[in-house]
Image (cartoon, rainbow, N blue to C red):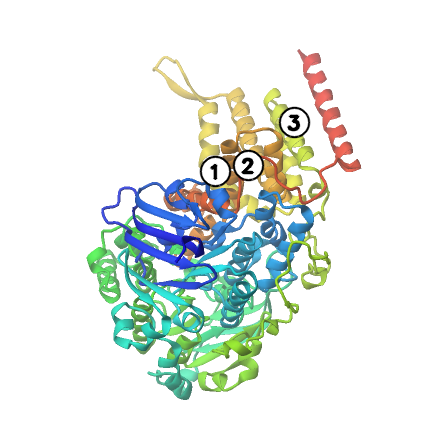
Amino acid sequence: MDAVSYATELRDVSYRYPNAEEWSLRHINLSVEKGKFVAIMGPNGAGKTTLSLCLNGLIPQLMEGEMTGEVQAAGLDTGKFRVQTLARHVGLVLQDPEAQIFGRTVWEDVTFGPSNFVFPLPEIEACGRTALELVGLRGFAHRNTAELSGGEKQRLALAGILALEPEILVLDEPTAEMDPLGRQELYAVLDRLRREKGITVIVVEHSPDEVLTRADEVVVLDKGQMVWQGIPAELFADTSLVAKFGLRPPRACRLGHARETGSRKQPKEPGAEAEKTPVIEIKGLVYCYDSAPPVLRGVDLRVFAGEFVALVGPNGAGKTTLAKHLNGLLKPRRGDVWVANRNTKEHTVGELAGTVGYLFQNPDHQIFAASVQKEITYGLKNTNIAQDCINERITEALRFTGLSAVREKHPFSLSRGDRQLLAVASILALGPQVLVIDEPTAGLDWTGVQKLMTLIRHLHSQGTTVIMISHDMDLVAEYAQRVVVMKDGQVQRDGSVQELFVDPVTMTGAALAVQPNPNELNIEKRPAMPVITSIPGKTVPLEPVFDQNTHSCAAGSRDVKDLPNSSLWKCLDVRTKVTVFFTMIVLACLFQSPVLNLALTAGIAMMAWWSGVRPRRIAGVLMPLVPVFVLVLAVNAISFAPGLSGHHFVLSGSGIERGITFVLRILMMVLATAFLTVSTPVDEIVQLLHNLRLPPSAAFVITTAIRFIPALDRRRIQILEAQQARGARLEAKGITGPVRAYIPIMVPLLIYSIITANSLAMAMLDRGFGFAREVTQLRETSFSGKDFMILGVTILVLAVLIYARLVMQ
């Protein structure tokens, strides 16, 4: 067959990461024909993600290591063409959706790639609108990306790539956090893109059900080698082969009996005595983030001791928000949550940690120690348990999870499945009565799923109450006794598994459809999605892009995060904001007066608040800097002075004044960065850097750093939540208490910084950053009357203060 008919070819490709002993890929030879759908399957650690990174040049161009062989994609040698050039032909959706989101709002993010490739503005509008419609995010344009659920972020990451209209689409576990109907819709979209656009689709996937009905070919990897290649039906018809490769059997082999009984090994129902003992009781729970619309709307729920409850529903239904109320990570705005007869409003997370164990959606969000044993030890040291008992609990947790042999290893050297087991072990060591697990099997291979769920079932059999959030309805059918269905922040249905599975109205309405016929699939099932009869080209007539009615702030709200350009500062040109920022910095450097620096800092803080940066977020960012502030004050305020008895320490009034000034300058820099990040779209910052004629490498570093700040802040919050869930008392008393509480996050935050910086760099190149010297501006950049007014006031203040300084001299 002629080579031109291939979308991508790998010829004897091998790859080894830096400092690694084993090769991640070994002599891979693979040719994918144009327009075909190929699934890459295999256990965790088989090399699937590494293979996907080879297809658009991230390996070897960005990822260091040793590579042999050749990769051709869309007729281009991935080792010779820039990643930005390849990204126009090969779209890669990475495994972690958060690392691929660059915009403050959904619309800013989905248009980031097309603007980097200098699409004309009308084409950007058309591509962005179409991409959002295809992934089911129509009407989300104004939404703040930080407030999206995990599944919604996964949809947005895909939309950002679809907006580029690539020839080859590579997706690394694209549906791991999506609800069942969302998965169906995604694969329906991929089918349509193949049919109407001829796009080649390569998907890394653990679930066999979509692969079985849609893929033209399956490639199985194991330990970096291709161990099987062929038609899906041939692979999954051979159960011994499926078991040998550690793959999940198709639903047809698992679901029949589960549908009849609710479970293949249905746990016994709680007895009458258990039913009289509600371990969790929720009454009229209402919760909203800041002043945004309520995420939970009057939830009433009782969970009895010894139950296994599944919490299900579509992405964005409020499941995780509800779960975080069960151990006090979130406090009700209205209503009450009672855990073991204790109101969570009156108790800290640390006080509830011994009663409710919380397993986060991503195990990496709750791992922060240097070894497996230290990870388990962390929570126990926050209790009053004697050291002998602590050692016993550690040993038992390691034995129970099968991690005894790796107790001295670093957690991040383990596989994804073992890291999930470690997260379970760290919670189990505390001996909680209730175990809350959020999407425990997302991203796990079938072996990992079975191992984890067997462990959870054993815990339940010993009397632990289990509350499991899951989109995997097969697991719900097999393990749960009771299902609570959530939709739009409310409990839509609460009953047995058997009752739910024979209720097609609830199943479909809550995006829980098990397996509709692909030929009958209607992606309009979500009310927000319009009819899409074809994939629009770049000349589609423009229609209104934003649906203002789909997301509005609560009445009387001053929250502006979801409404771009709703404040004075968001309306200003980015050049005006940067001018104001640097003017304040110049003034701070010219004047040593603490009073003036305090006034400037207060001014920046006010601008940040008007731009949507809440005081709580500002405090969270500044808290880790408290040790720096103390050190700066001490160095400037304390000095040595000679005396009759030798040298001694003295406090200097001028030194204290100087130290306060330096602290205020640091505060000003942090607040100004937060102000610029929140109030300025990414494309405006990128355009400004280009206009300043900065080298592409410098512009890349600055833009990555700006994008990195909110990502780092989110990770800080995740680590703090994980530590609180294991008994950490962050409300420690005294001046040094808060500082001591933050010290444990420094090392994991540094590790995360290195990992995330690399992921962000890959994602930015994948979206075409640096492709051209200029980018398409999504809005007018001409100065308005407000800009001239602000600049005039700034220049006037600068002139007056400089004049005053000269006069004083």
Q: Mark 3 or mark 2: which comes first in sequence?
A: 3
- Toward the viewer: 456 or 118? 118
**Of the residues shown, which amino acid type is indicated by label 3?**
Thr
For marks 1 and 3 on the same chain, the one whose residue lies earlier in the sequence: 3
Left or right: where 484 falls relative to 272: right
Say if mark 2 contacts mark 1, CB within 8 Å. yes
Q: Mark 3 to mark 2: distance in Å?
A: 15 Å
Asked if 801 appears above or below 561 in the picture, the reply is above
| Above or below for 760 versus 263 | above
Q: As drawn, is 56 to the left or to the right of 405?
A: right
Q: Residue furthest front?
A: 2
Tell me which corner region of the image, top left, top right, bottom left or bottom right, holds residue 118. top right
Label 2, secondary structure: give it. Answer: helix
Write the residue at 65% across / 54% down.
538
Q: Position of residue 324 (x, y in %)?
A: 48, 63
What is the number of the mark on residue 583?
Answer: 3
Q: Position of residue 651 (x, y in %)?
A: 47, 23
Residue 578 can be seen in this image: yes
- Write down the residue under mark 2: 670
Identify the residue at horizontal 64%, vertical 71% (top origin): 527
* Cα–Cα gap, marks 2 and 1: 10 Å
Q: Quadrant of residue 427?
A: bottom left
At label 3, counting other C-alpha atoms closer than 10 Å, the crowd grade (few under 14, some 14-19, many 20 or more) is some
- Farthest right residue in view: 785
Q: What number is the disc on residue 625? A: 1
For numbered disc 3, what is the local secondary structure?
helix
| Left or right of residue 690: residue 215 | left
The image quarter containing residue 679 is top right
